[in-house]
Amino acid sequence: MSGADAAALWLTVRLALVVTAILLALGTPLGWWLARTRSRARPFVEAVVALPLVLPPTVLGFYLLIGLGPASPIGGAWLELTGGTLTFSFTGLVLASVLYSLPFAVQPLQAAFEAVPEPLLEAAQSLRASPLDAFWSIAVPLSARGFLIAAVLSFAHTIGEFGVVLMVGGNIAGETRVVSIAIYEAVETLSYGDAHALSLILLSFSFAVLLCVALFRRRPARAV
Amino acid sequence: MRSDALEVEAVVRYRDFTLDVAQRFPPSGCTAVFGPSGSGKSTLLRAVAGFVRPQAGRIAFGEAVWFEAGAGRFVPPHRRPVGSVFQDGRLFPHLSVERNLAYAQKRGQRREQAFGLDEVVEAFALGDLLSRSPATLSGGEGRRVALARTLLCGPRLLLLDEPLAGLDGGRKAEILPYLEALIARFALPVLLVSHDAREAALLAERTAVMSGGRIAAFGPTAEVLSAEGIAGHAGSVLTGTVAGHDEEAWLTTIETGAGAVFVPLARERAVGAAVRLYVDPRNVALATAPPRGLSIRNVLSAQVASVQPEPGTAFAEIVLDAAGDPLRSQITKAAAAELALDEGQAVFALIKSASFDD
């Protein structure tokens, strides 16, 4: 494997780690809200969160390209502030990936939170736990599996994306050239050896991740 | 120790049900909240605990105002010094028994009245259960842990919502002594929701009878539960004091105004303590002369207060005056006719000791 391929791999892992961290931080309150709210806004928020599941990545990528571009308010402000554009940068890639993988974090968390019995949270409050305390001490441990699945799926899905990355990030080595782009380029330039190596790595990784999730889903929870 | 009265004035409206109560609960002892399901017992408790916010009214515990509709005041559940024990125990499944207890203790530590862990573990005989997971506990064991856990959070008022619900007869008998001990030993004011008159009679010195979202009657348990036509149960409650325990015969003697009653040994009751006995009318037989050659040991002197034939059945309800306590007896109309029972007549009421064994 060439140095460029290794750089693409490392960039991909870095991107996936950052995106997963952001998604867990974002998905936890959002998933909790969706699981517990009686607000009429809930179905709308749920639909928006699920959009990346059905939209072609090019559609999302197109809107992001416009929304984050230097001509847009966000992209313009970013340019003012940092002197660089948001599109075709690592930061832009992170933003796009967070949106693209949002349902993969929010949906498992929401499902896990919905399974936390309200009576247990009441019991915690009757024992002097504030709602936030009850969330951390009861809801989070009981949703541990949901957190793991959300993290693994966010990580894996970020690694596997292509369309959005291509639209928003382009193909800048060391900045936006992730593995899936590198494979595409290798095929375009008929470097099938490189394409084989990188593809095999992604294939084995994805399979291993999904196997882990499947195994973990079956394991019964234990009291400590 | 400070003790405060609980004053509840609350209106809670649901689509098809309204709770509307105004009641002061005295600052000590156990008050039963008694009534059929759907009468608002649990809603009342949830309003006191803070899990339900009434539309109108005021809830105060001593000086502390927990809810006041006009002032927009609402103290959330975790800031009320209330210990709730729920019907289903609600132990945290991901924590061992010990850590369930520690959960409450940690959060109750700074309260003035938190009981020690050792004391509570001993009182509920939890020593052998500490390392177990809640999923492996029997129904009765789970209830004991739930009661102990609630005490550890330092409550100044206990709310017990049918703590024996869902347990079979044997398990109930296993938990009852712990409940009695809890009420006596930890000396907290208790509101006990129950739809079982026997349970209320056994545990509570006062009873509030609920019906259709309102408190229909409130007063001493014996008086309230024996009053006619309340909450559709037919039993009566005798008041007495513990006269002594006979370990050999396995009996405890209760002295009532109308005579001694022998019940299965109840060691946990101190001699001299006031007790209430719930008597099912079907277990009360009548005789017009002192009976002889009979296995029944409990013979009370009473007077017939009224004879009421139950239309469409073989039975008649005889209400007796047993030294001031009303005592009901259900016998056949034929037997009532044969004995020629009349108001004011002196009779002997016979109660099987086995009927007190629950």
Image (cartoon, rainbow, N blue to C red):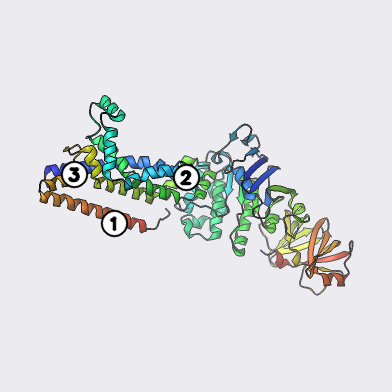
> Looking at the image, do the residues carrying marks 1 and 2 touch, with CB atoms under 8 Å apart?
no
Do the residues at discs 3 and 1 belong to one chain?
Answer: yes
Q: Disc 3 or 1, which lies upstream in sequence?
A: 3
Label 3: state its secondary structure. Answer: helix
Q: Quadrant of residue B177?
A: bottom right
> Looking at the image, do the residues carrying marks 2 and 3 touch, with CB atoms under 8 Å apart?
no
Q: Residues within 10 Å of mark 2 (few under 14, many from 20)?
A: few
Residue at x-position 65% and y-position 49%: B40
Label 1: state its secondary structure. Answer: helix
Q: Disc 1 or 2, which lies upstream in sequence?
A: 2
Label 2: state its secondary structure. Answer: helix
Given residues A155 and B191, the one toward you in this image is A155
- Count of numbered circles in the view: 3
Q: Which residue is mark 1?
A: A211
Q: Which residue is mark 3?
A: A181
Q: Chain of mark 2?
A: A
Residue at x-position 31% and y-position 49%: A153
Residue at x-position 24% and y-position 48%: A160
Indicate which disc residue A36 carries: 2
Per the model, the C-alpha gap separating discs 3 and 1 is 25 Å
Q: Extreme bottom residue here?
A: B293
Disc 1 residue type (three-letter): Leu
Disc 2 residue type (three-letter): Arg
Do the residues at discs 2 and 3 belong to one chain?
Answer: yes
Given residues B188 and B330, the one toward you in this image is B330
Do the residues at discs 1 and 2 belong to one chain?
Answer: yes
Instruction: Residue B250: give x, y in percent of width and height.
Output: 68, 66
